[in-house]
Image (cartoon, helix red, strand yellow):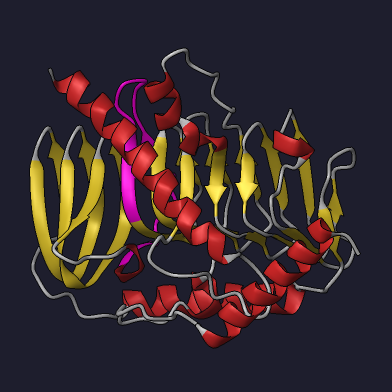
């Protein structure tokens, strides 16, 4: 057994120990996401997770090159599809594990660092397939049971969130070129639309947004302050129109928190989600867009999943990409 193989085995064993011993289900949310809270991207239905984020070209300016490193991974965190869905990706790597349920498929194209489109393990269910011609650590370990439980947990969490009593009278948030700060609470909204605006969530409590009709960010940001964390922010969208994060070349959208949208597509046309995306329909992550798993907790996939290094990678990547997006926003406002 060579040193490289020994190191990989040791890292795998250490990861398993940490995930079992340190199950960081420390969210203060009034609803329990259960095993649905362990992902960067989770497809609960039979839709397609499409990732078209391209690896950025190298810049002669070393400072600029460092700031764009985060886009090397369009998804930092575990990715799963529960009901025969499809993963279609080109360009940037998945930094984490990939879980393919029964009869699901993953199709990769493009050029990847070390010829690896997935940095972690690919867990394959019965009848699952994955593109050839790439270096992949495939394991046929029947993850369908866990994926089905995660799907059930997501459905239960959405229903539980919808049943919460709102803590205020706010019924919609529609902002254009405005900045607003909200305290922790439960908000039942018909729409959450931000256009070149910033919504700051402040406080160490939980934030639950039940949104029934429209949910869009356009060159806008949902940021955290005063002790708020991604794991304590839930956007429970029950509508059917697309959830969209869009922007321009100079000003992408940024959202911190968990998007739970079981009945709609999620389209990151130009946006960063620091937290999690859960959908029962198609999930699209476009060029210069990314999803980064909750930075303040280790993934809780039992006995499998992310490595401890993933948490540190997330911190560095988030800081770099967030700084880049803030510089773009500041430049656009001048």
Vertical position of residue 153 compared to residue 311: above or below:
below
Residue at (48%, 60%) from the top-left corner? Answer: 311
The percent coordinates of residue 143 (x first, y second) are: 76, 73
Vertical position of residue 148 compared to residue 127: above or below:
below
Vertical position of residue 32 compared to residue 215: above or below:
below
Residue at (74%, 28%) from the top-left corner? Answer: 110
Q: Quadrant of residue 104?
A: bottom right
Q: Quadrant of residue 92?
A: top right
Horizontally, residue 105 falls left or right of residue 180, namely: right
Determine the residue located farthest toward the front in the rendered image.
3
The percent coordinates of residue 18 (x first, y second) are: 57, 79
Residue at (37%, 24%) from the top-left corner? Answer: 63
Residue at (8%, 67%) from the top-left corner? Answer: 169
Horizontally, residue 222 falls left or right of residue 150, namely: left
Q: Quadrant of the C terminus?
A: top left
Region of the chain picked out in magenta, as a range: 233-256
In-front residue for pair 73/280: 73
In-front residue for pair 226/107: 226
């Amino acid at each position: 057994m060579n040193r490289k193989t020994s190191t990989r085995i040791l890292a795998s064993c250490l990861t398993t120990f940490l995930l079992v011993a340190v199950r960081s289900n420390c969210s203060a949310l009034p609803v329990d996401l259960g095993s649905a809270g362990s992902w960067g991207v989770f497809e609960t239905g039979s839709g397609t997770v499409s990732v078209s984020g391209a690896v950025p070209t190298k810049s002669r300016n070393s400072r600029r090159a460092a700031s764009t490193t985060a886009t090397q991974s369009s998804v930092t965190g575990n990715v799963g599809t529960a009901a025969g869905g499809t993963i279609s990706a080109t360009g940037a790597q998945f930094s984490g594990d990939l879980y393919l349920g029964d009869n699901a498929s993953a199709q990769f194209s493009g050029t990847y660092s070390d010829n690896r489109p997935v940095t972690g393990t690919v867990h394959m269910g019965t009848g699952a397939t994955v593109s050839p011609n790439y270096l992949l650590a495939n394991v046929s370990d029947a993850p369908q049971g866990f994926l089905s439980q995660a799907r059930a947990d997501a459905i239960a969490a959405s229903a539980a969130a919808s049943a919460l009593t709102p803590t205020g009278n706010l019924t919609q948030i529609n902002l254009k070129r405005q900045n607003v700060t909200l305290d922790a609470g439960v908000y039942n909204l018909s729409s959450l639309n931000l256009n070149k605006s910033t919504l700051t969530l402040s406080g160490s409590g939980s934030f639950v947004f039940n949104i029934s009709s429209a949910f869009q960010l356009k060159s806008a940001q949902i940021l955290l302050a005063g002790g708020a964390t991604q794991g304590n922010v839930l956007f429970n969208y029950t509508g059917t129109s697309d959830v969209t994060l869009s922007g321009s070349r100079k000003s992408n959208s940024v959202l911190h928190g968990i998007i739970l949208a079981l009945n709609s597509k999620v389209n990151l046309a130009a946006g960063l989600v620091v937290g999690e995306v859960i959908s029962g329909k198609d999930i699209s992550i476009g060029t210069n867009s990314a999803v980064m798993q909750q930075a303040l907790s280790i993934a809780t996939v039992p006995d499998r999943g992310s490595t401890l290094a993933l948490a540190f990678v997330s911190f560095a990547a988030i800081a770099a990409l967030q700084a880049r997006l803030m510089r773009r926003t500041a430049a656009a406002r001048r």
